[in-house]
Amino acid sequence: MPDPTVMDLPLNQISDDQFKTFFDDYMGEKGVREKSVVKGRVIGISDDWITVDISYKAEGMIDAKEFKTPEGEMTIKVGDEVDVYLDAMEEEDGALVLSKEKADLMRAWDEISKAVEANQVVRGSIVARVKGGLQVDIGVKAFLPGSQVDLRPVKNLDKLIGETFDFKIIKFNKKRGNIVLSRRVLLEQEREEKRGETIERLQIGAIMTGVVKNITDYGAFIDLGGIDGLLHITDMSYGRLNHPSEMFEVGQSVEVKVLKFDPETQRVSLGYKQIRPDPWEEAEYKYPIGAIVRGTVVSLPEQGYGAFVELEDGIEGLVHISDMTWNKRLKQPTKIVNVGDTVEAKVLGIDIENKRISLGMKQLEQNPWDVVEQQYPVGSIVKGKIRNVTDFGIFVGIDEGIDGLVHISDLTWGQRIKHPSEKYKKGDEVEARVLSIDKDNERFSLGIKQLSEDPWYTVHGRNFLGQVIEGPVVHRTDFGIFVEIEDGVEGLVHLSELVVDADNWQEQYPEGKVVKAEIIHIDSHDRKISLSERGAIERAAGDGGEGGEGGESRAEDKAPAKKKSSRASARLGDVMGDLSRKLKDKSEAQES
C-alpha cells in the first residue's frame, strides 16, 4: 500500500526514490504483476508491431502476427481493449514484454480448469492425426485417444480432421500441460438416454426410422436411437442383392420394420423390403403361362444348368439349359447368353408358393422337328459332318439342332467293324440315306450302306450251288469260320466241313487266311450261305483224276465216290429249289 505521508507532500519535495516506491506500490495495488494477465489498450499499429498501454509507467510491444488471422487479416484497431500476458518488466530500458498468445493460453487453461471442476463439456476441433489418436484444439491442444473417438472403432481417423465435436475431459494436469478427451463417454450417455425412449416404442411390426451405423457382408446395423438393430441382406430387397452396400451407405437415414425383438438380450431384427408390397402377390396375373416376357440375365450358375432372368425387382425366372435352344449339343449357357443381356422368353410354368417361374427361350422359335419330315423324307439322301463317334455308331449333323444316327450295323453290308472309329472320325463329311424319323422322341435314323444295293438281293445271280469260291477268313466261331465271298456277302464253313482235326482247328484258320470252299447252300431270305472246304477238295480231286491212273479203279476210292454221288444229288435238289425261289421272286416283283 502506498505511504500516505508521501501523498501529502508537494511534488518538489518528493525525492526520486520516494516517487518510484510510491508508484510501484500504487501499480502493484492495481494488479500489474509479472507472469499475469492484464488488460491493455491498443495505442499504435504498424506492419510488424502492436503498441499496448496497460496503464503502467511504460508501454509494451507485441508482434503483429499474434493479432492476425491465418489469412493475414488484422483483428484489432487502435482503441481496442485486449488481454495480454505480462511476461517481464525490463528495469533498464523500462520496456514491457507482453504476449497476446500467452494471455489466450492462460485464459483457456483457466476456463478448462473451471470446466473440469464443474464437470462440464468442452467443444473443440480435430486438427491433426497423432500417434494413438487425434489432436484436438479446445483453446489449448488436447489428446483424443483412438478408442475414445466413437462407440465403435473408427478405421479411418484422418476423415475426422476438421470436424468439430463436444468432448468430456477425462484427464487434466495443468502443470504438465496434459489434457485427455473422450467423445465416446458422451455418446454412451446419449445412447443410454435414448435407449429407454426407444425400447418403449419398440414392438414387432412397428415402423421406425434409424441411421445406418455399420455395413457388413451379411447385412447392416441400424441405430434406432440408443439401440442397434440388424437388417439382414435377405430382408433388404425382394430381388437379387450381392452386397448391402449396393443399397445402403453409412450415415444414411432409413425406414425399417421391426421383425423380431428380444427384451432380455435387446436384439432387434429389422426388415426393409417388408414395408413394401411383395411383387409375387400379383405375379400369377402378370406372368401367366404362355405369356412372352422380357428380362435381364442376372445370374449364370457355375453348375451350368441354366440362366436366371430378372423380370422385375424381386421376381426372377429360370431358363433351363434344355429350354434355351433346340440344339441338344449346348453344354454351357454362356454360349448363348451372358450376365446383363436382355432376353425374351415364354412363361412355361409358375409356382407362387415356392416363388419360381420357369421360362423358355427356344419356345419362341419353330421346333425344327416339326418340319424335319417334310425337309428330309424317308429314303432321301442327306449330307453332313460327323459330330460324334460312339461305340454303337456315328452322329451326323443334318441341321441346327438335329443329328442323325448311323448305327454300326448300317455302316456297311458285310464288312465286319468292331468300332466305327475304324472307318470314320469326327469332322468327316459323309452321305447317308434317311431310314426313319421319330418326331416324338426326336430320333433320326440314317444308313450309309443303304446308299448301295443290298448284295443279298442278287446273290443268286452271281453265285450258284456247287461253285467253288476263294476268300479270306473274316471271323471264327466255336462252330466254324466265316469266309468273305464278295463285299457284303459272307459264307459259313461249318466245323464238320473243314478238312483239319477238330482239336486244334482254330490255329490253322487265322483271320485273313485265304481258303477255297464249295457253295452247298444259299438262303438269300435269311442271308445265309453254307460252304464246304471238303467239297472244294473233293470237287478238285474229281475234276482232275476221275477213274484213277490208267482208268483203273481202286477199292479205297469206292467209298468217297459214293459220298460224292450223294453230295452231287443233294446239290441238284438245291439247284432246283433255288431256281424255283428265283422264279417266284421274279413273278412277285412283276405283279407288284
Image (tube, grey):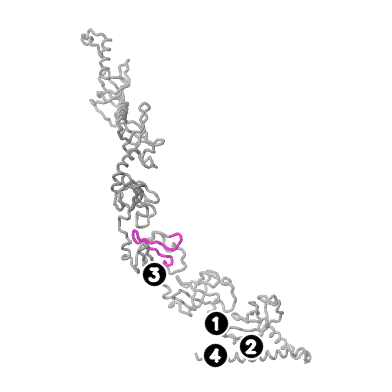
Labelled disc at residue 105: none
Amino acid under disc 2 = Leu
Q: Which residues are magenta?
A: 301-324
Q: CA distance from mark 2 to mark 3?
A: 62 Å
Q: Nearer the viewer, residue 315 or 438?
A: 315
Q: Which label's residue is closer to the chain start, 1 or 4? A: 1
Q: Which mark is residue 363?
A: 3
Q: Estimate the spatial distance between the alpha carbons at disc 3 and disc 1, rounded to whole Å.
A: 42 Å
Mark 4 and mark 2: span between their CA atoms?
Answer: 19 Å
N-term mark: 4 or 2: 2
Which residue of the protein is positioned furthest toward the front in this rendering? 264
Alpha-carbon neighbours of circle 4 within 10 Å: few (<14), some, or many (≥20)?
few
Q: Secondary structure at mark 2?
A: loop
Residue type, label 4 = Lys
Which of the numbered marks, if any, corresponds to residue 586?
4
Q: Residue at x 31, y 65 (%)?
A: 286
How many neighbours does mark 2 have within 10 angstroms: few (below 14), some (14-19), or many (20 or more)?
A: many
Task: Give percent across and percent down for residue 59.
Answer: 27, 20
Residue designated by label 1: 453
Task: Give the residue type that dot 1 points to.
Answer: Glu
Q: Nearer the viewer, mark 2 or mark 1?
A: 2
Q: Position of residue 157 (x, y in %)?
A: 38, 40
The label number, if any, that marks residue 465 in the structure image:
2
